[in-house]
Image (spheres, coloured by chain):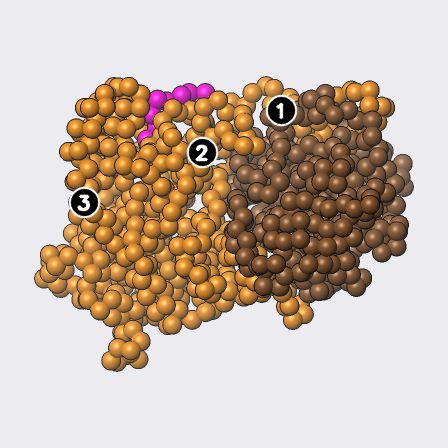
Chain colours: A brown, B orange
Amino acid sequence: MEGKTEVQGILTKVDMADYVDSADVVIIGGGVSGLSSGFRLAKAGKDVVLVEKGIVGWEASGRNGGGVGDRGTEPRLTALGLESLRLWDNLDQELGYPTEFKRIELLGVALTESAMGAVSESAELRNKQGLECRVLNGDEIRKMVPEISGNVVGGSHVTTYGHANPQRASQAFAWGFQDAGGRLYQHTAVTGITVEHGRVRSVETTAGTIKADVVVSAAGPQTGLIGEMVGLRVPISPARVEILVTVPLEPRLKYRLHGNGLYGGQTLRGNLLFGGGPHEWTDVGLTSEPSKPNTPLVRNIARRLAELLPGLKSTRVLRNWAGIVEQTPDQYPIIDMLDEPEGFVLVTTSAHGFGLSPATGQAVCDLITRGKSRIPIDGLKLDRFDNVPDDWREQVRWQVGAYNT
Amino acid sequence: MDKAQLVVVGGGVAGASAALEAVKLGVEVTLIDENPLDFSMMGLDIPLCFGQRMMPTVRDKGLMLQRVVDSNELLSEAQEAGVDVQLGTYVWGSFTNQEHSRQFETPVLGLADDERSWLLEYDNLILATGARDFVLAFPGRHLAGIMGANAVDSLINRYQALAATNMVVLGSGDLGLSTALKALDHGVNVSGIVDVSPEVRGSDELRSTLEARGVPFYISHTAIEARGYREVEALVIRPIEGEPGANNETEIACDTVCLAIGLVPNVELANLTGCLMTFRPELGGYVPDRDEYRRTRVGNVYVAGDIDGFTENMVSNPMIAMNQGKLAALSVAESMGMIDQVKADTTRQRLIPTLGVMEGDSTNEYRSAWLSSLVSTGGMEVNVCQCEEVTRRELLDAAPPRFLGWHGKERGHGTFDGLMKAGPLNLDHVKRITRAGMGYCQGRRCREEIAMLSAQAAGVDVAQVPVASYRPPVRPLPMDILWPEDEPEELRNNWPIWFNIPWVEAEWRGKQKYKGFSPR
C-alpha cells in the first residue's frame, strides 16, 4: 500500500516509510493508558503498533495535575493505586527517561467546618481499608504549610502519594515503548475496526490497514466512537476542565494539597500547579484534535489558590490551559477484555488515568498475555453499565453544553 | 458585565486613530492601553525588552500617566471626542464561544490594572497591539542593559525614563538608525551601530545624519558577547566569517545593547480570539490573515498597525499605521450601519493607496544571517531560553532540563531526531520536553530563535512550522489581581473539586454513590 496520506485537522502528511500491515496488538490512543499498555506488551515480547491521531500525551495525559495516589477512598481502585505507586518508584529506570516522579505526601485542608466533615469522611474511608490517614487540627496544618490560610480548621495527612510531570511522563512512556520495539504512528487516526466471526481482525486507519487479532482501545474521550466500531455501547461523557500554573518559586510546598476546591502542588521546577472547579460537558470528533479553549475561570481558580495560600497570593499566574477527560456513568474506569468481540480490550479511566497508568498498563498486558490481571480489577467491567439507558447523559445533566453539573 | 460596541486594544498611532475615526462615525468606543506599565512587569521584559534600563521614576504611576498622555496627542484627541480611554490596563485574555466552550453569549476580554481584574464584552474588536522586539541570544545577554528597539522608543517617548548612557545598536535598518538618532537626541551616547549586512540597510538620510554626529558604523560585523558584572560594560564584536580580519575583536565600551534587528507582531490576542495566521517573514513573523477591509477570519475582529506586519518603511511614515487604523474603524462603522457603503468605499479609495507596498525580507534571510553569525561566535552552549536556562544544544538534543540532573542510559528514540521521525516539527511539543519557552517572559525573548533553530534542525522552512500556542493570561498577573471580586454566588457555593459533582439520583444508578473528597 502507498505510504503518503493527507489527513485533516492537525494531522499532516505522514510518510509511511515503514509500512506495517500486521501486528500482534494494535493499541488505539497515545495517552498514558495506551502507552503504558504498549510498553508492557512490547517488553513481554509482543509486536505492538500504537496509533495516535495527534501527538502522544497531547490530551488529558499531558494536561492533568500530575497527582499519583493510592485511591484509598475508592476500594475498587485501591489495588491498582497501590501497585501504581510501587511501579512509579522505578519507572524512570524502566523507561530510561525521566518522568519527574517523586514521592510526596498529601494534605487535605479544610477551611470550613463542613469541609472538615468531608475530610473526616475520607479519612474514615481510608482507615476502613486499612490505609493510614491522620486527621490533623489547624495548628498542625499551619506547621506543615506556613503559607496556609488563617481559616484552616484542620485536615488530613496521607503519606502514600506522589506526583510526576504529565508531559514528560507521557513522552517517557512513548520513548520507552519505542525503545522496547514498539512501533508508534502519530498523526494516524483510526477510522474503523473489522470484526469477523466474533473476533477483531484488523484496524483501519488514515494511513492503511493493520491486521491484528488483539486491539486495545485506550482512546479517552473518543472511546464511545471506537466502541461503536465493534458494536459496543460504551457510555462515556467527555468534559473540558482547566488548570493554571504560576511562575516558578523557590521550593516552598513540601506537600501536595487538596483544599478550598482545588488540587495541586508545587512542581519540581517550582511552579504552583492547581486545578479545580466547574467543567463543561461536551462531545468530541473521531479524527481531529479537539479544541481546548480556556475561559475566565482562571480568575476563580486564582482566587481560591490565593485564599488557600494567602502567603503566596501575589505570585504571578503564568499560564492556564484546558484538557478534555471522559467520565463513565459511575465515574470509575473500565478495564475489560471483552468476550464479544474476542480480542478487544477496553480501557477508559474517567480522569483517574495519569496516576494509575503504570498499573493500568500492567493489567492490560496481563489480560492479553495471561487472560487475567494479577492486580484485581473487579468492578471495572463494561457490563456493569448494561442497564444504563441511552439517554443517561441527559438524565444526570451531563449532556453537551451542560456546565458544572 | 459591561459591554462595548467597539473595543480597540492598543493606544498607539493605529489604535488611537481607529478609535478617533470610529467615534467620529458615531460608534461607542472603548480604547485600552497598558501604558503606563507596572514597573515590575517591565522588569520581567514584558511586553518589551526593557533590559532593566528603566529609571526609578517609572514607579511613580501618576507621573508616568501624565507623560503617557502628554506624549500621545491622538490619545487626548480621542478622549476629548468621547472615546472611553482606559490606560494602565492590560488585556490578558480573549474568550469566545466555540466547540467545547459554549458559555458566552458575546465574546469577552479579560482586563486588569494594578489593582483588580474584570471582564468586558464587545461587539467589535480592533487589535492594534503593535509589535515587540525580535530577540536573539548571545553570551552576556542575561546582563542588565540588553534592550530592544521598541523598548528604547517606549522609554524615551512615553516614559522619558531611559536609564542608558552609552549604547551600541545591533541592526542598521531604519529601525536601528532611528533608534540611534532618538537616543542621541536624548543625551545617550551611541558608540556604534553593528550589522552583519555588507552595507547599511536603512535610509541614506538617516545614515548620513548619524555619521555626521560621529556614530561609528560596523557593517559586516557581528556580536561575540556582552561583557560585564551584572550589567553590560562592553560589547565585543568582530567581522563576520569570510571577512578580512575576521579574528580581530573590537571591544566597545557601553552600558546598553539595543537589539534592532527587527520587530515581531504581537499576535497573542489574535491567536486566542481564533484568528487564523500566516507566517510572513517580510512582515516580521506571524500575522493574522485579513481582507482588504482589515477584517480577520473572525468576523468581528479587525487589525491595524504593527500587528498587521512591521516593515522598516513604517518607521518614518506614521501615516501608514494611522490610515490602517482609520480603515479598520471604517469597516466596523460600516458593519454597524453607521456609514453607507458608497461613502465608506470613497474613503477607502482615498486611504488604501497611502498604505504603500509592504517591502521586506521575504526569505527571513536577514534574521537567519544574524542568527547563524551569533551561533558561530557564541556557540551552542548559549541559553536560547533565558528564563528556563535551556541552551541551544539542549533544545536541539530534546534534552530533559538540567535541573533534573538526569543521567540515564543512552537515549534511543528520545532525541530531537527521534521526534522528527515520529512526526512533523511541532514547537509546542519541543517546548514541553525541553521547557524552552515556558518561562516568566512568556516566550517573548526566545520564541523566534527557538522556531528558527528547530526548523533548521528539522530541515524545514520556518514558515511551514505551525505557530506555537499562546496561553492566557498573556500578561503574568498576580493571583490577588486576577482575583474576581465579581464571582457569582452560584459559583462561590457550588464549586466542585474534581468532578465531585452533585449526585443525580437515577434508578439505574442504584444505591451507589460517588465517594471522594468533597470540601464545601
Considering depth in this image, is B144 or A347 the residue closer to the camera? A347
Which residue shows up at 33% across the image and 59% down it? B364
Chain letter of the residue beneath label 1 in the structure image: A
> Disc 3 versus disc 2: distance between alpha carbons?
31 Å
The answer to whether tags 3 and 2 share a subunit is yes
Up/down of A51 relative to B7, above or below: below
Q: Which residue is mark 2?
A: B94
Which residue shows up at 57% across the image and 59% down it? A3
> Disc 2 versus disc 1: distance between alpha carbons?
22 Å
Q: Which residues are magenta?
A: B1-13
Q: Is residue A74 visible?
A: no
Quarter holding residue B516? top right
| Image position of A366 (left or right of A230) | right
Q: Which residue is mark 1?
A: A402
Which residue shows up at 17% across the image and 48% down it? B316
Q: Is residue B317 visible?
A: yes
| Image position of B290 (left or right of A267) | left
Query: Which secondary structure dominates the residues rendered in magenta?
Result: strand
Say which quadrant the N terminus of chain A sits in: bottom right
Asked whether disc 3 touches disc 2, contact meaning CB atoms under 8 Å apart, the reply is no
Q: Say which of marks 3 and 2 sits in front.
A: 3
Considering depth in this image, is B430 or B59 the residue closer to the camera? B430
Considering depth in this image, is A345 or A269 the residue closer to the camera? A345
- The secondary element bearing badge 1 is classed as loop
Up/down of B181 relative to A279, above or below: below
- The secondary element bearing badge 2 is classed as strand
Callout 1 amino acid: Ala
Instruction: Say if the magenta span includes residue B6.
Output: yes
> Disc 3 versus disc 1: distance between alpha carbons?
50 Å
Asked whether disc 3 touches disc 1, contact meaning CB atoms under 8 Å apart, the reply is no
Up/down of A370 relative to B73, above or below: below
